[in-house]
Amino acid sequence: MRRNGFLTCLSLIVLGTVAGCHKPEAVTYDPQAAGAYPDPYAPEPYLGPAREYDSYADEAGTTPEEAAYDKADFSIEPAVRYHTVAKKDTLFKLARTYYNDAAKWKDIYSANRSTISDPNKIYVGQQLVIP
C-alpha cells in the first residue's frame, strides 16, 4: 500500500513537469495605469518656468510698475516701543516680559543711559525706550 502511494505521488510530479505545469508569473498592480486616484504623497511634476522669457522686454524699457519698484525703499526700520515704569518693575523683569530673555536687560539699559543713572534705580512713571 505504501508503495502504491509513493508511486502515485512520484507519477504526479513527473506528469506535472512534463505537461508544462508551472507557477504563474507574478502580476504587478500599477494604480496609475489602472486609472485609480493619483498618489497624494507623490511629488508634483515640474512644469517648467513660471513664465517665458521675453527678450523684447529688455529692449522696450521698463514698465511704470517696474520703475516704481526700483525706486521703492525696502529698508526695515526697527520698531521702537515705550514702557512706563510701574511699581515693582525692574530692568530684569522688563527684559523677561519683552524679550523672553532676562539677560537682555543690558540692551534696555544701554538704550536708556541718558535717563537712567543706575540700572538698579528706575522710578515709577519713568518712560523707557524698549529697543
Image (cartoon, helix red, strand yellow):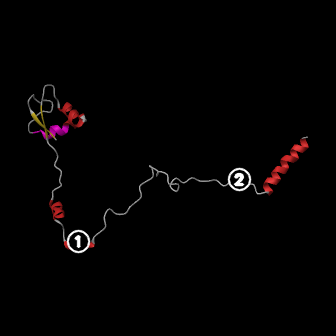
Between label 1 and label 2, give the one nearer the viewer: 2
State the residue at coordinates (59%, 53%): 28
Residue 116 appears in the rendering = no
Name the residue type under label 1.
Asp
Tag 2 residue: 23
Query: In the rendered image, which quarter is residue 74 located in?
Result: bottom left
In the displayed structure, does residue 24 sit left or right of residue 4?
Answer: left
Which numbered tag is attached to residue 71? none
User: Residue 8's x, y, as percent?
Assistant: 86, 47
State the residue at coordinates (20%, 32%): 92
Distance from Cα at disc 1 to Cα at disc 2: 68 Å
Q: Main secondary structure of the magenta part?
A: helix
Whether pointer 1 and pointer 2 mark residues with C-beta atoms closer than 8 Å, the reply is: no
Q: Is residue 39 above or below residue 62?
A: above
Q: In the rendered view of the protein, which quadrant contains the C terminus?
A: top left
What secondary structure is marked by label 2?
loop
For marks 1 and 2, the one nearer the N-term is 2
* Residue 76 forms part of the magenta stretch: no
Q: Which residues are magenta?
A: 106-113
Tag 1 residue: 58
Query: In the rendered image, which quarter is residue 4 located in?
Result: top right
User: Residue 51's x, y, as percent?
Assistant: 31, 64
Name the residue type under label 2.
Lys
What secondary structure is marked by label 1?
helix
